[in-house]
Image (tube, helix red, strand yellow):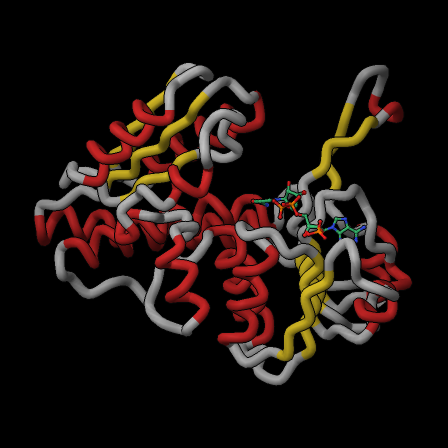
């Protein structure tokens, strides 16, 4: 058996097209242009790549992009003052503070200073609480992208056994919550989980969000299961030449694809969906701020 490949790149392109359509209508019918502000503190190379990509895609769908690049030694007071300014700027509908922040800044304090209505990453404690109680919230982009792919593939995931490997606040926990809200039976696994292979073997849906290259081999996967690989790991690729690297997920793709029913590739799976969902969340925030019907 060979798994269906869930093409996150193509799916994300479709989502961006829909977002661009909503943006056009907001402009033409209401004279409103959604705006996304991205704040980057310091010069972490991976964060710089993400921020550039977010800015580019924001502009491509017709929204305004406001990038704030701050020095690595920016004080907490200055960062909080910028967030306050963005909270009060009516042209800004979404605010994203790129994580991780340099060590001297309190991440929880910074994230919780964002107006929850503009918190397009969905990390503010109010949005976490709303999601946890099944109320309307801003939903974290990476788990939202995973859920959209699962819904698209299965129609309904109600009653399915899902295992989420990883319990971080930005991926694992909100992912588990979203699966639960869609009536899956959810197990959350982590570094202390006993008999992880057996836990994973029981799952109809496996979401791997660990950050360990190719940790989940095919013989952990139940035949026909759907595998969503969130991991992004750069490893050496001597076969491509000296000093070369390549990206792999948390799942060993080749062996897992032989048993799974469907699987997301890395790259080209979850990654592209994350930014597409960020753009969709910004449109949602803009509609809510203006009392307009939000996209489905
Ligand atoms: P974290 O490091 O915050 O969390 C990793 C989780 O994996 C922890 O809960 C940890 O458990 C668990 N874990 C670690 N080792 C094991 C193990 N041997 N067995 C079982 N569980 C283990 O990572 P993130 O959630 O931020 O990210 C996870 C991965 O997803 C990374 O590769 C990251 O790059 C990627 N990512 C991809 C995104 C995308 O857009 N595609 C977006 C965000 C992240 P414990 O809590 O016990 O320590």
Can I make out residue 116 in this image? yes
Position of residue 149 relative to residue 109, above or below, is: below
Q: Which x, y percent locates residue 221? A: 83, 66
What residue do we see at 77% from left, 25% from top? 245
On-image quarter of the N terminus:
bottom right
On-image quarter of the C terminus:
bottom left
Position of residue 293 relative to residue 285, above or below, is: below
Question: Which residue is at the front of the view, 8 or 221?
Answer: 221
What residue do we see at 57% from left, 82% from top? 158
Position of residue 246 relative to residue 261, above or below, is: above
Q: In this view, does 212 lie to the left or right of 175?
A: right
User: Looking at the rendering, which quadrant does residue 190 occupy?
Assistant: bottom right
User: Looking at the rendering, which quadrant does residue 216 occupy?
Assistant: bottom right
User: Looking at the rendering, which quadrant does residue 176 occupy?
Assistant: bottom right
Position of residue 119 relative to residue 84, above or below, is: below
Can I make out residue 152 in this image? no
Q: In this view, does 265 lie to the left or right of 41?
A: right
Q: In this view, does 123 lie to the left or right of 2?
A: left
Q: Report the label total.
A: 0
Q: Which x, y percent locates residue 88? A: 16, 39
Question: Which residue is at the front of the view, 193 or 198?
Answer: 193
Q: Which x, y percent locates residue 231? A: 68, 46
What residue do we see at 53% from left, 45% from top? 272
Q: Which x, y percent locates residue 247? A: 72, 35
């Amino acid at each position: 058996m060979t798994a269906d490949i869930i093409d996150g790149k193509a799916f994300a392109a479709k989502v961006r097209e829909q977002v661009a359509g909503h943006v056009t209508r907001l402009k033409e019918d209401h004279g409103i242009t959604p705006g996304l502000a991205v704040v980057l503190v310091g010069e972490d190379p991976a964060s710089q790549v993400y921020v550039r990509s977010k800015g580019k895609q924001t502009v491509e769908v017709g929204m305004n992009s406001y990038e704030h690049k701050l020095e690595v030694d920016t004080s907490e007071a200055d960062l909080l003052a910028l967030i306050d300014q963005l909270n009060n700027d009516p042209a800004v509908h979404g605010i994203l503070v790129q994580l991780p922040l340099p060590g001297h800044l309190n991440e929880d304090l910074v994230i919780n200073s964002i107006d929850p209505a503009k918190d397009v990453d969905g990390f503010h404690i109010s949005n976490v609480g709303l999601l946890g109680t099944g109320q309307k919230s801003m939903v974290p982009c990476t788990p939202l992208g995973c859920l959209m792919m699962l819904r698209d593939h299965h129609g309904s995931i109600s009653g399915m056994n899902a295992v989420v490997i990883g319990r971080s606040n930005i991926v694992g926990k909100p992912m588990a919550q979203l699966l639960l809200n869609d009536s899956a039976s959810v197990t959350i696994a982590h570094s202390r989980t006993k008999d992880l292979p057996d836990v994973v073997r029981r799952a109809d849906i496996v979401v791997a969000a660990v950050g360990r290259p190719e940790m989940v081999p095919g013989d952990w996967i139940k035949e026909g299961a759907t595998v969503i690989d969130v991991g992004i790991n750069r490893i050496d690729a001597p076969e491509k030449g000296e000093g070369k690297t390549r990206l792999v997920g948390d799942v060993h793709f080749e062996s897992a694809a032989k048993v799974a029913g469907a699987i997301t590739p890395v790259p080209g799976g979850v990654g592209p969906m994350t930014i597409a969902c960020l753009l969709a969340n910004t449109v949602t925030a803009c509609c809510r701020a203006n009392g307009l019907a939000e996209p489905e």
